[in-house]
Image (cartoon, helix red, strand yellow):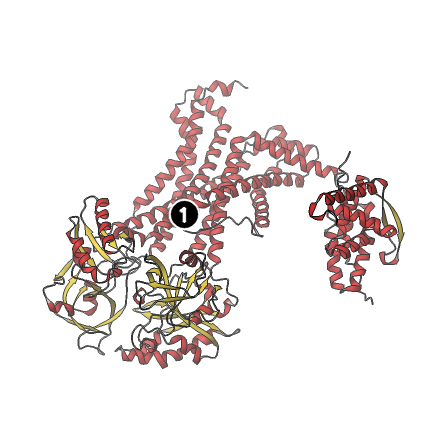
Amino acid sequence: MKETRLGEFEEVLLLLVGILGEEAYAFKIAEEFEGQTKRAVSIGAVHSTLNRLLEKGFLTSEMGSSSPERGGRRKRIYTITAHGSRILSDSRDFKVSLWNQYPGFANG
Amino acid sequence: MKNNNAIPPALAEKLLLWFLKEELAEEVLGDLDEKFYATVRHKSVMRARRNYWYQVFHYLRPFALKKYRSKHSNFTIMFKNNFKIAWRQIIRQKMYSVIKIGGFSLGIAACFLITLYILDELRYDQHYADKENIYRVIEETEYMGKDFKNVWFPAPLAQVLENDFAEIEKAGRYNNAELFGSGSKEVRRTDRKLNFYETRFTYMDQKLFDILQYQLLSGSPGKVLSNRTDLVISQRKAEKYFPDEDPIGKTLILNNDEEQVYTIRGVMENPEAIHFQYDFIMSLAGVEFWPGEQNFWGAQNYPTYIKVQPGTDIHALEDKLEAIEKNYLMPAWKQSGELNIEEKAKKTRMALQPVADIHLYSADIEDMLSHGDIRFVWLFGGIAAFILLIAGINFINLSTAKSANRAMEVGLRKTVGSTRRHLVSQFLIESTLFSFLSFSIGILLAYFLLPYFNLLSTKSLVMPWTEWWLWPVLLLSTLTVGILAGLYPSFYLSSFKPIHVLKGKLSRGSKTSTLRNALVIFQFTTSIALIIGTFVIYSQVNYILNKKVGFDKDQVVMLHGANTLEQSRSVFKEKLLQLSSVKSVSISDYLPIDGSMRNNNGFVKAGKEGEEEPVFGQIWRVDHDYIKTLGMKVIEGRDFSSEVLSDSSAMIINRKMARELGFENPIGEKVENFELTRTVIGVIEDFHFESMKGEIRPLCMVLGNSPKTMSLKVTNANMAETLESINLLWDEFSPNQPIRYSFLDEKFAAMYSDVKQMGQIFGTFAILAIIVACLGLFALSAFMVEQRSKEISIRLVLGASLRSVLSLLTLNFVKLIIISILIAAPLAWYAMQMWLQDFTYRTEIGPGIFILSGSLAIAIALVTISYQSIRAALANPVEQLRSE
C-alpha cells in the first residue's frame, strides 16, 4: 500500500475540498486556503498536493464546467472519496483522543 | 474596469505551455487566468502580471513537467553516451587524468584563494553610505626635484575648511602621533590594580567620527567625544575590560595617570575593512598639546578629512583650496623663518583623495598607515591567471598529444554518421567534465589550504560558502574554463578525416608539436620568471638583514612600559646594572626601529635664521648611555658625559646632518632650531633608523627625558637566565604590571616583514607554478616514450648505449627549457629592477641568480623527464617488440 499518512497541508486541503463541494478546483482551493489561514500559497503548490492526494486515492476528479473568466476553459473539480473521508475522520478521532488524554485540557 | 493591458503576460503563458504536460494545460491555464483577473480586480495590473509569472514558476514541479525522454530520445541517449565515454577515458588513462585534473585543481585552488584575497582588499572603505562625498586632504609638494605627498596638516585646518568653503559640509581630523600619546598605552580599570598593555590608541574629534560613520553599539550618537576625557572603545575591548557590564560611563586609567581619568562614552563595532583601525578613540575636544597649539599653523600633526555637499566639483574645490595657503600657511612659514616662501607656495598644493581609494592607492602618500597596494592586487591577479593558464595548457597539450588514441573513435563515429558538431560537443562535454571534477577538488583544496594562505597573506579570510554569488560564479567558471580548455582540442580532434584515420595514416600525434613546444616554453618561462623573482626578493631581504646598519642590534633587550616606574626608574636602572649579564642600560623611546618616537624639526646654523633654508631632521631625546648601549660609532668629537654640565645644551649630530648643514668642522658649531641653540659636541656615523626604502635623513641627539623604553645591552651568556633575573627585578619594582620585553634585532627584522612576506608569497606561487608545469612535462615525456617505445627497443637491440637513448629522449625537452630561460631572464630582470627601485639601499641582481634559477629549472625538468626515459631505456626490448 502507498503512503497513507496525512501531512498538515494535505489534511487542510482535503477538508477544503469537502467544504467547497462543487466549487473545489485548484484556484478556488488556493484562494480559500489563503483566506482561512492567512498564509500565501501558489496554485502550483496546491495543484501538486491535490495530484498527490489523487494518487493516494483520497480524491477523485473530473473536468467540470467552464466560465468566461477562464477564457472558456474547463476546470478540474475534486471530490473526496470514501477512503479519503475515512482517513479524515480517523485523523480527527486520533487527535481528539490525544486531547482527551491531555490532563490540562481533559474537560475541554 | 478592464484596459487593453489587462491580459495575462503572453511570454509567461508560452513558457508554461513549453514545460507543462499537455493534458494539464486546460485546467491550469484556466486557474491562472482566474487568479489573474481576480488580482486585477483587487490590486493593479502590474501586480497581477507579476503574480502570473510567480504562479508559472511555481508550476515547475515534477508532476507537472513534460517527460522529455520520450520525445528527444536520441539526443538524451547520445548525451548520456558522451558522459559514459568521457568517464571511461578518465578511468582508463589514470595517469593522464590525474595529471590533468590534479594540475587544474592546484591552479583553481590558487586562483580561488587569490580571488578571495583580492575581494578582501577591494572591500576596504566601501561601506560608507555616501562614500563619494568623503575625502582625505592630501598635501602635494615638490622638494629637490621629487614629488612628495603627505597627510599632515595644522590643527586649525579642519575648522577653517568647514567655515570658509560652502561646499564642505563637515571637516574632521585625528592625531595618531606617538609623540602626543597615541599609539600604545598601559590601561586599567579605575577599580583594578593590574595594567594591560594596549596598542591602537588615537585622538579623534567628533566630526571625523561622524564622517567615517563608526557604528555605535551603545552611547548617544553625535555626543561620544564631546569632552576632554571622553573615550570610545571597540566592542572587543569592551568585552575584555567590562565583561557582562555596561561600559558606558565607566572609567579607565591610561598610563597610570590618575589625575586624568578617561570616561567611556561609546562602544563601537570592531573596526574592520577601514584604512585605519583603532580600538581606543580619545576625544580631541579641548585638547591642547602645548599652549596655543590648536590655533598654530606652523606644526603639521593632523590628518584631515572632509565631507562635501553632494554634487560638488572636486577639482574646482581643490583649486579653491589655494586660498588656505595664501591666508594661513604662508604667514606661518614666514613666522618660522623659512625663505623662498613664494616658491614653496608654488610647489605646494592641496589635493583631495576619495576615501574609497585610500586603502589601495596610497603607495606614494606618507601617512604612517599600513595599507594594501593596487599594484600587488594586479600582480597577484596576474599570477593567479598565469597559474591557471599553465594548468590549462597541460590540458590542451595532453589532449592533443593523446589524439592518436582517440583518432580511431573519431573515425568510426564519423563513418556511422556523426557530424563534426556532434564531435565538438562530445569533446566539450568531456572537457567540461574534467573542469567540473577539477573545480570540485580545487575548491576543497582551497578550503584546506586557507589557514596556510591566511598565514602567508596575514589576512583572516574565510570561505564564502554562504555568499549568494559563490555558486553561480563557480558554475559559470566551471563551464567557461571547461569550454575554453576544450575548444582547441575538440576542433583539432574532430577534424580528422575518417578515411585517413581508419587506414592508419595519421601521423601519430607529432603534427602539432610546434604548438605544443610553444606552450611548454610559455609554461616554463612563467615558472622561471617567478623563481627568479623569488630569489631576488630573498636576496634583498638578506641584504637588509645583513647590511651594516650603523648600530649594534644584537644582544639588546628592550623593556617596554618603563614610564610607569615613575621615580623608582633610576634605582631600577642601578639595580639592573648590578646584574652581571647586563653591560649597560639606556632610557630612551627614540630607537632605530618602527613604532618608536619620531619628530621633525627645522635646523639652521646659529645666527643664520632667515638667511638659509632650514635642514629638516629628527631630535632624539636620549640619555648618557644611549650611544654606548646601541653601539653607534662616534666619528668625531665625543659622546655625552655626565661630568660635563654644559652637555645639557649640547647635541650630537649624524654625518648626514653635518653634511646638510655644510659643516667642515662640526665640533663646536652652534645650531639652532625652534626650541633653542645648541653646541655640536660629536658626530656619529649614519645609521638606519627608517626603512631602507628611503635615504638616511638628518638626525641629532640631545639629552632629555623619554621614559617609556629601557634598552639593555646584555652579554652573550645564557639569555634565558638573564631574562629571568631581569624579570624578578621588574616584579619587585612593578608588581601590578607584567613585564614586557622584546629584542632589538627581532624588531628590526619585523620592519621588513612585508618584504619577507612578499618573498614567501612569490616563493609559494613559484613552487606551485613549477609543480603544475612539471606535471605537464612529466605527462608529455611519458607520452613521448610511449610513442617511441618500439624505436627505442630497436635501438637498444642494435646496440645503442643507455646514454645515447637517454639523451635522445631528453635533449628535446632540455632545449625547450633553455629557450624558456633565455626568454624569462631579461623579463624577470626588468621587472625586479623596477621593484628594487622602491629601495634606496638595494642589492645588485648579479648573474648568480640567473644561473641558479636556470640550473634549478633544468634540474627539476630533467628529474621529471628522466623517470620515464630511464624506465624506457632500461626496459627489456623484447617486451615491446614481440607484439608484432
Extreme-left residue of the structure: B643
The quadrant of the picture occupied by the C terminus of chain B is top right
In the depicted structure, whether residue A85 falls above or below residue B157:
above
Q: Position of residue B167 (x, y in %)?
A: 48, 77
The quadrant of the picture occupied by the N terminus of chain B is bottom right
Q: Is residue B26 left or right of residue B212?
A: right
User: In this orientation, which residue lies closer to the viewer: B533 or B334?
Assistant: B334
Q: Position of residue B749 (x, y in %)?
A: 29, 51
Residue position for label 1: B455
Q: Quadrant of residue B293?
A: bottom left
User: In this orientation, which residue lies closer to the viewer: B447 or B491?
Assistant: B447
In the depicted structure, whether residue B28 falls above or below residue B200:
above
Q: Quadrant of residue B256?
A: bottom left
Query: For numbered disc 1, what is the local secondary structure?
Result: helix
| Mark 1, other Cα within 10 Å: few <14 / some 14–19 / many ≥20 | few
Q: Position of residue B661 (x, y in %)?
A: 20, 69
| Residue at image point 77% right, 55% down | A36
Camera sees residue B429: yes
| Residue at image point 74% right, 63% down | B46
In the depicted structure, whether residue B695 falls above or below residue B826:
below
User: In this orientation, which residue lies closer to the viewer: A3 or B248?
Assistant: B248
Camera sees residue B631: no
Extreme-right residue of the structure: A65
